């Protein structure tokens, strides 16, 4: 299993540009989420999904859109990038894995985004 | 919603000493409390978690304690080693049984272990 994968690893955008951060998991997990990580502020939830076709807002959803057409994929879209969106973005999936009796949340490797 | 406060923000110890990181939470319905370790440039990795039906859980040099009355929980690392140096995050969530809801994270603690 690849676990949770994210692309790209690093991206530079100009203010106003749009882009999509990709996230995929091969563990058949229903629950997926996006976080942003800024210095001194921990991990803040942007959007999450409890299954295909179902998404909801987290703590800091403004400026971001998501959709969940399949169980495996959960892309995050920035429609008009702003410097305040410079951050490290982590995708996570949560569910059962072999050998563990309860749900566990796993993070992807992250995407570093710089908006100029 | 849930609010999680984590202290201290930085912690420096000598190799072999113990390290303690504390978190408080606001939502009395929260019943799942994981701890994540994040090394520089890497993703957060789960190191230990505890559910509200127990007061303490141990895994080798790492232990977590939970006080539901006071709404706080702590991470204890004994016999620290330089490779324990990282950022540690606590989190809290409500949920039932084997599943749980949205995780709210603390602000993180930078732990430095000096050889």
Image (spheres, helix red, strand yellow):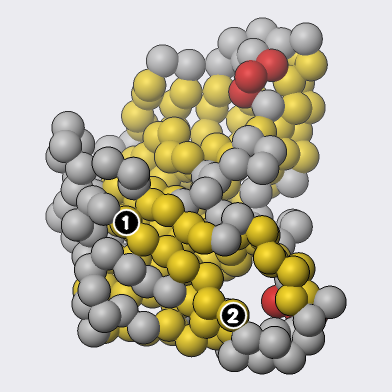
- Image coordinates of residue B54 in percent, x first then y, are 28, 38
Say above or below: A24 vs B6.
Answer: below
Circle 1 sits on which residue? A25
Circle 2 sits on which residue? A19
Label 2: few (<14), some or many (≥20) within 10 Å? some
**Left-right relation of A46 to A51:** right
Answer whether residue A4 is visible to the viewer in this image: yes
Depth check, front residue: A80 or B40: A80
Q: Name the quadrant of the C terminus of chain B.
A: top right
Depth check, front residue: A105 or B28: A105
Determine whether the residue tagged by mark 1 lies in a helix, strand or loop.
Answer: strand
- Image coordinates of residue B7 in percent, x first then y, are 68, 46
Answer whether residue B5 is visible to the viewer in this image: no
Numbered marks: total: 2
Q: Chain of mark 1?
A: A
Label 1: few (<14), some or many (≥20) within 10 Å? many
């Amino acid at each position: 299993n690849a676990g949770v994968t994210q692309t790209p690893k690093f991206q530079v955008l100009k203010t106003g540009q749009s882009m999509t951060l990709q996230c995929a998991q091969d563990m058949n997990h229903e629950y997926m989420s996006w976080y942003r990580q800024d210095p001194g502020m921990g991990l803040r939830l942007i959007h999450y999904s409890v299954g295909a076709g179902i998404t909801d807002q987290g703590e800091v959803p403004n400026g971001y859109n998501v959709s969940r057409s399949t169980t495996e994929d959960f892309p995050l879209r920035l429609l008009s990038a702003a410097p305040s969106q410079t951050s490290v973005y982590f995708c996570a999936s949560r569910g059962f894995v072999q050998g563990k009796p309860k749900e566990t949340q796993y993070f992807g490797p992250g995407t570093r985004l710089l908006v100029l | 919603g849930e609010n999680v406060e984590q202290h201290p923000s930085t912690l420096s110890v000598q190799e072999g000493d113990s390290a303690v990181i504390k978190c408080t939470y606001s939502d009395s319905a929260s019943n799942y409390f994981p701890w994540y370790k994040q090394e520089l440039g890497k993703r957060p990795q789960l190191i230990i978690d505890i559910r509200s039906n127990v007061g303490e859980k141990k895994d080798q040099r790492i232990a977590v304690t939970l006080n539901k009355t006071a709404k706080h929980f702590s991470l204890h690392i004994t016999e620290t080693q330089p490779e324990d140096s990282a950022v540690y995050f606590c989190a809290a969530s409500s949920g039932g049984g084997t599943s749980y809801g949205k995780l709210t994270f603390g602000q993180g603690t930078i732990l430095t272990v000096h050889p």
